[in-house]
Amino acid sequence: MNQPIFEITEQDNNKSYSKFVISPLEQGYGHTLGNSLRRVLLKSLGGAAITSVRISQVKHQFSTLKGMKEDVVEFLLNLKKVRFSYDGEKPITVKLSAKGPGEVKAKDIQVPANLKIANPEAVLAFLNKGAKIDAQMEVTVGEGYLSADDREEKSIGLIPLDAIFSPVIKVNYKIEETRVGRFTNYDKLILEIWTDGTIKPKDALIKSADILISYFKQILSPKKVEKQEVKIVDTLGPTGKLSVEEIGLPTRVANALIKAGYETVEDLVKVKKEDLVKVRNLGEKSIKIVAAALADKDINFS
């Protein structure tokens, strides 16, 4: 097969939307490129988002704040919509301090020079006269989506948030036939990309192509994966031999664990949390019960 030669033209472009036309492509390669790029654009690009919030005088999310029109849940939902452009890697703390009357907007969040808010006019809350809000938030970098349920609250008053890190909001593609000379069986790939404004669509496309190239390079010139031997040290002692029924678990939880093959404390310590959640009749509340029972035995269940 000859070296592929095609053109990429950008149409209707602005800060957060672009349409790309990639043509001509050998028949079938329109879908090959379109599907691959769409997958990477939506799932593998990094971004920054608020992952936890601490609000003065608020102990949990199902609360109200005196003088604020929205309840705390609504306020948190609005915080999730704030989009950040961050060139760092470590989590960073930002603060919000505002007094009424009036709207509280994303631009009221105090951020350092290396952190920028892409949608400063986003409304977070409305405060009545005399009302005020003081909040401290942690902005973290990541990829894809991170559920608040996957993180435990470190202290009372610290509220974890679901975080959408991906800077790409939507991707559409379609394939049309195009002509090369007298041949009409070539593909034209039309790719539309919408972003949250923290990255230009063209830059998102280039990064996605670069990620795909890194995977293909591993196929062409595989790097040897070094296998590390994991040494298991028995630090549980006699406690590890205790059955799940002997550590004070509710009968329903203990039975579900036994049916899934986790019969002893040693079994529980070895299993990953995400695997345990998949067990039938177990949920996040049950996992917390298991963690509490193990903590009573001085065992950290992470």
Image (cartoon, grey):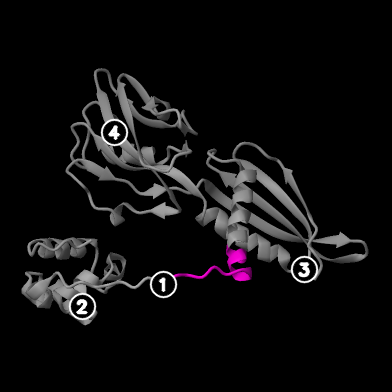
Q: Secondary structure at mark 4?
A: strand
Which residue does the numbered mark 1 point to in the structure image? 227
Q: Secondary structure at mark 2?
A: loop
Precedes in sequence: disc 1 or disc 3: 3
Q: Residues within 10 Å of mark 1 (few under 14, many from 20)?
A: few
Residue placed most toward the observer, 176 or 53 = 53
Residue placed most toward the observer, 79 or 291 = 291
Q: Residues within 10 Å of mark 2 (few under 14, many from 20)?
A: many
Precedes in sequence: disc 2 or disc 4: 4
What x and y, as percent, mark residue 87? 48, 38
- Which circle marks residue 136 in the picture? 4
Calculate the distance from the C-alpha at mark 3 to the C-alpha at mark 2.
Answer: 52 Å
In the displayed structure, 245 sits above or below 194; it is: below
If the image is split into quadrants, where does the N terminus sit? Answer: bottom right
What x and y, as percent, mark residue 13? 68, 40
Q: Residues within 10 Å of mark 3 (few under 14, many from 20)?
A: some
262 within the magenta span? no
225 within the magenta span? yes
Which residue does the numbered mark 3 point to in the structure image? 27
Picture quadrant where residue 10 is located? top right
Picture quadrant where residue 23 is located? bottom right
Precedes in sequence: disc 4 or disc 1: 4
Precedes in sequence: disc 1 or disc 2: 1
